[in-house]
Image: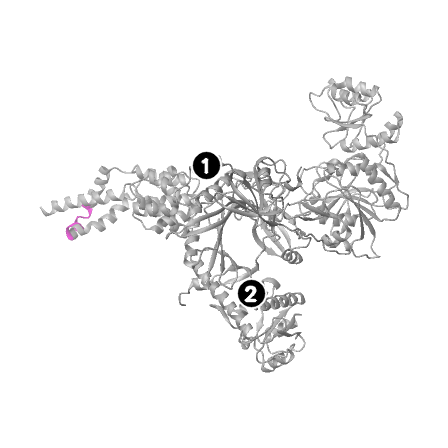
Amino acid sequence: MNEKLKGYKDKAKNMLEKYEINIWDIISIETKKSTYKGILLPRNEYSAPNVIEIKLDNNYNIGINTSKIIQIKKLGVRKADYKIPKKEFPINKKLPNIILFGTGGTVASRLDYTTGAVIPSFTPGELFNAVPELAEICNIETEIVFEILSENMRPEYWQKLALKIEKAANEGKEGIVIGHGTDTMGFTSAALSFMLKDLNVPVVLVGSQRSSDRPSSDAALNLINATRLATSDIAEVVVCMLGSSSHDYGLIHRGTLVRKMHSSVRHTFRTIDDLPLGMIKDKKINMFKQDYQKRSDKNTIAKTNFEKNVALVYSYPGMENDILDFYVDKGYKGIVIAGTGLGHVSTKIYDSIKRAIQEDVTILMTVQTLHGFTGMNVYSTGRELLNMGVIPGRNMLPETAYVKLGWTLGQTNNKEEIKKLLLTNISGEYIERELPIAFNYNIDQLIKKKK
Amino acid sequence: MDKLDYKKLGLKCGLEIHQQLNSNTKLFCRCPNELQGNKNPDFTLKRLMRPVLGEMGVYDKAMLTEYLKGISIIYEGYNDSICTYEIDETPPFSCNNEAINIAIKIALLLNSNIIEEMHVCRKNYLDGSVPCGFQRTMILAKDGYLELEKGKKIGIDILCLEEDAARKIKTENKINYFRLDRLGIPLVEIATKPDINDPLECRETAERLGLLLWSTNVKKVLGSIRQDVNVSIKEGTRVEIKGVQKLDWIPVLIEHEISRQSKLINIKNELKAKELKKDNIFNKSMDLTKPLAKTNSKFISKGIKSGKILHGINIRGFKGIFGTELAEDYRFGTEVSSKVKSISGLKGIIHSDEDLNKYKFSESDIKKIKELLDHEEDDCFILILGNKNEIEKATDVIINRIQYAFEGVPPETRKAIDNGNTEFIRELHGGARLYPDTDSQAIINSEEKINEIKKSLPEYPWNIIKDYSEKYKVEDQKIKDLIFTGNLDIFNELLKIYPKNPVLIITTLLDTSTALRRDGKKINNILEKDYKEIFNLLSRKEIGKEAIEEFMILKSNKPHLTIDQIKKELNIQSISVEELNKIIQKILDNLIDLIKEKEMNAMGPLMGELMKEVRGKIDGKVISEELKKNLTKKLEEINK
């Protein structure tokens, strides 16, 4: 596409070409009724044709239909002059050294007022400029590991990230923070939990639900909480995000039990089936649970092998055999089913399940209710599935189960060992006891009671 | 004051009007468009606003100042009228079409060009009044005009459709409390061009804009329309005056602003003539806390005892400037002091142009101050008392404001106060706070839609006023009042039901309801359908016009009653003319002596007696006619 007239097509493009006008030019458009002066803006390629879009002097954007335009004049060119103020991140030898890995998304950013585009800031200096509070917590080093939208996350990125963490943890970084898009943060936290054996420092995943270019963003507060947490003694992979809609406290979620539960609210992350590990407010950490792995001198080992041919399938009424057959035909090695109720599928797809297991495809059952355990001895369907060789995933979240199955199949080909690994609590994905309040805990009430 | 020569002064005024629209739901979510009054909120949320990096990678100064105040925000919401959109937890939904259509109608009445493709923009607000930190706004029309009575056309620069902000309830312990019910109500902002050159013309423009808006589907309650006036004169600068609540304030505010600006220009020229330079007038600024610890002034010594610091600033050659009157009851000293109050939180300043006796300084106090500050005869000194932080901020404000005296009039947003003067709110915002809203789609205003709306444009209200006042023989003001009380539509409806007495309808809607409201009656309980039923009863002669007020009182007190039930409760059974005549006969017989004595002059007292029995049960006009007829007959009988 012609970058000079980005997004313009048909009549609008012809007209702009005729008057030799490019985007960012300052122009005046004469219509039958009015004259509009402004800067020609690039256009979204999916927007209506035959409209020319400009930013007026008063900074409002408007679109003018070409059919109304008598003529266009070029008055000049807008000069862009971006400068980010250079500020050094102050080093304080008394404070712990933290590394922040970037994976995409924006923890700190500034705005291009013309396009509305968000320009990320990521160097320590830029971060310090945006969130100066960080300098009171730690010394920070940053590294962009990759720059992707979190929906485009892939197992190979988890592997790369795990290796980076292994190196940083063993080379003396006292804590690791990972900036991550929130969409698949729960998958990544589970993957890192399984891949990092004997983790010796905190690994904290953090993101924001309101981008950092808006004054009401949760990004700065989440980042402050996450870096503080990275200096704590919790040597686990955790997610740290706001715990309520207020800009008040963050919650600390174990990486294998956490799930994004709302498409947009700030407190979207919830620990499922258990209480969160704890909370953080005004840099103070308050633990709800004590059974967490502590900081140690062990050597962290990244076991990153991962079988990519694993699928996650949602059971639904009317499901047919061809769904599972498809994966088996394609050579998939494992399938996680998010089953109905206690871990069921329609008896109509027994054939495809039997076939899959016969062909050494591991089938791991979870519950689409998210809360609660599989209970495959309760009804005949469950018993029959167990008998076929389906492995019950207990309380595991379907997403965590998907990651665990991929990771397990990456570790071994042995059928018995696969089953054994799957049924072993590797990284806190299994709970022993389900607390009655775990189903619908209310943190605000919990805090009030504690007081 | 002599009438000023506005042309020579180069007076330019513009108006900015904000008006809430009366759509069913809000602009970007489907919450009801209803304020919740003083109802207790169902939930609260705490939020912090952080300044964001601007286009050039730096923080906006005003934003940073706001942030450094350390203010947090508590939002108060209601479960049945606030959704996750208002609390900035869900992206916007589609823009409300009903609101767009109302705004297009207004734009067409203002002869404006409708923008074919609207783009929603964000305007940053860090005071917390919008939970996401920005207001969503879009230009809907541009370059229209409003015609005044004598034919002058006032240009309409832009008409924007935007969301109203949350209501500020209070500030307590560095927390701003906002209630979210108002947030998101559709609003049109109309900005005129600076084509207005006379204070009365500005009043007329504001009145016409108001009338025009209130003849469309906008919210017609107190506070649903807000107007700001922009004023500048030659060599002066544009100053925005907010919070203009009454039309009659407009000319007064403008006169005062003209005076303020011209006097500031005079000061600028005076300083130039004195050959003073803004960079070397502050010869001394120092801490006077210790030397004046034992001052005679209780005000100062008490402050110092409580831990406050006293600072003095001496300004070379400034004698008399602080005492210069800029407008009635408003000196340059007031100007500096009100800015200090607004920014630093101090209660005010003391300066040597004011009567220092009121602070009870002793002569030796003054001497000491003058000596310590190297004060000379031509100078002015300022004293400020407060904590360290306040003193620092106040000193900055004072120095900046004094230095600006060399340039004339600072561009500011000011607030109208009761005596016709204004006080500083903030520096005038630049335009760079606007940027595209990446959460919404462009909105197309098709030619078909615009043409459809054109078909149903109402008549201009000033034509209606002229027409009605002639047709119904009432003053213009009455019809204006009908519009400005939101009663024109009801009037038209009632006129269809009861065409024979338009004045009675106007009196009912304006005078009776105002009187009852002043009496503390909740006349909002009387709905349009209630008025219709009352006038239906009237037109069927089931009640007399004298009963209207009683119906209104009872409906105000007992809103759950229907008009029919009220009729029963009032025991109004209409009577026929025959029944009336029987009652008249009875009274005439009873009061025969009075009739003999006063003859036709007995009409008055007889009417009084009669009304006791038949008030509201039959039309008063019929009563008086029948009484007259009967009395004449009776007198004839007597005189036979």
Residue B202 in view: yes
| Chain ID, mark 2 | B
B592 in magenta: yes
**Are dots 2 and 1 in contact, CB under 8 Å?**
no
| Majority secondary structure of magenta residues | helix
Q: Nearer the viewer, residue A212 or A192?
A: A212
- Residue drawn at x 83%, y 52% is A96
Q: Position of residue A198 (x, y in %)?
A: 88, 41
Q: Which residue is mark 1?
A: B451
Residue at the left extreme, as displayed: B640
Q: Residue B254, which numbered label?
A: none
From which residue to which does the magenta span run? B588-597
Give the alpha-carbon distance from disc 2 to disc 1, as whole Å. Answer: 51 Å
Q: Position of residue A89 (x, y in %)?
A: 78, 55
Q: Nearer the viewer, residue A185 or A124?
A: A124
Image check: B633 left or right of B439? Answer: left
First in sequence, mark 2 or 1: give its number.
2
Q: Badge 2: how crowded within 10 Å, few (<14), some, or many (20+)?
A: many
- Residue drawn at x 62%, y 52% is B126
Image check: B386 left or right of B261? Answer: right
Q: Position of residue B397 (x, y in %)?
A: 61, 66
A444 in magenta: no
Q: How is the image coloured?
A: one colour
Element on which disc 1 rests: helix
Q: Nearer the viewer, residue B556 or B605?
A: B556
Q: Which residue is mark 2?
A: B338
Q: Position of residue A306 (x, y in %)?
A: 84, 32
Q: Amino acid at mark 2?
A: Ser
Q: Amino acid at mark 1?
A: Asn
| Chain ID, mark 1 | B
For the N terminus of chain A, the quadrant is top right
Image quadrant where residue B342 sits: bottom right
